[in-house]
Image (cartoon, rainbow, N blue to C red):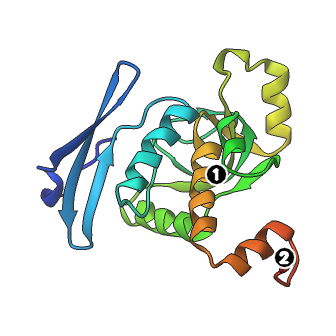
Amino acid sequence: MQFTIPRQLHHPVQVETLQQIGNHYPVYRGHDARGDFAILMMPLGAPAAVMNTDVLFRHGVRSAIAVGSCGALEPLEVGEFVVPARALRGEGTSFQYLPASRWIDIDADLRAVIGRAVEAAGYRVSDAAVWTNDAFYRETRAMLNRRRSEGCAVVDMECSAMAASHWRRETARQPRSIQSRMRSGSSRARRRPRR
């Protein structure tokens, strides 16, 4: 499978280099009909990936799409694009961004946009639950079977943390009354008494 880079992307300009403990990640800036964009090769693992995206968002990036690889827990077609629908939180980074929960949903609007773009390019795409795990060599056969029984079709090392970082930023942009509702789970905003 070969991808064709659109003509306007052939010469993005390097604008930054993110450094993490001996690793260097160049950041490129390009422009197309929709506006400016950045391209960055993401590091392996939730903590490093989220550190890089946090830096980009602090510098004005508004949206991010991570494209990477994953392990298949269920049979997939060669070259099939898997768009995560939700992620089982088996790493530690996401818990620094959102309260504890077993699963985290992936933004439905973003998933729809990605799915349409992949299909328009002529590739097969599927939605799947992802198990995010940061202990690669601790994935036992029993654990893999358990994750499959929970509905996970693939395993990766970053998805749930990247989603938690996204939802943390989205929550921070909401008006305070909506944040209160989101946290409380009630249909009414709760007011704190003034002291």
From the viewer's perspective, tell me whether residue 138 is left or right of residue 184: left
From the viewer's perspective, tell me whether residue 81 is left or right of residue 99: left
At a point 35% along the width and 55% down the height, the residue shown is 59
- Dot 1 falls on a residue whose secondary structure is helix
Question: Which quadrant holds residue 194?
Answer: bottom right
What label sits on residue 164 in the rendered view?
A: 1
Q: In the rendered image, is residue 48 in sight?
A: yes
Residue 44's x, y, as percent? 49, 29
User: In the depicted view, which residue is nearer to us: 104 or 20?
Assistant: 20
> Going by the picture, which residue comes out furthest to the top?
137
Local crowd size for mark 1, using a 10 Å CA cut-off: few (<14), some (14–19), many (≥20): many
User: In the depicted view, which residue is nearer to us: 109 or 95?
Assistant: 95
What label sits on residue 192 in the rendered view?
A: 2
At a point 52% along the width and 42% down the height, the residue shown is 50
Residue type, numbered disc 1 = Ala
Quarter occupied by the C terminus: bottom right
Question: Which quadrant holds residue 127?
Answer: bottom right
At a point 72% along the width and 53% down the height, the residue shown is 104
Local crowd size for mark 2, using a 10 Å CA cut-off: few (<14), some (14–19), many (≥20): few
Residue 97's x, y, as percent? 66, 49
Residue type, numbered disc 2 = Arg
From the viewer's perspective, tell me whether residue 68 is left or right of residue 22: right
In three-dimensional space, the C-alpha distance between marks 2 and 1, rounded to whole angstroms, equals: 26 Å
Residue 183's x, y, as percent? 80, 66
Quarter occupied by the N terminus: top left
- Dot 2 falls on a residue whose secondary structure is loop
> Going by the picture, which residue comes out furthest to the front?
195
User: In the depicted view, which residue is nearer to us: 3 or 131?
Assistant: 131
Image: 112 above or below 78: below
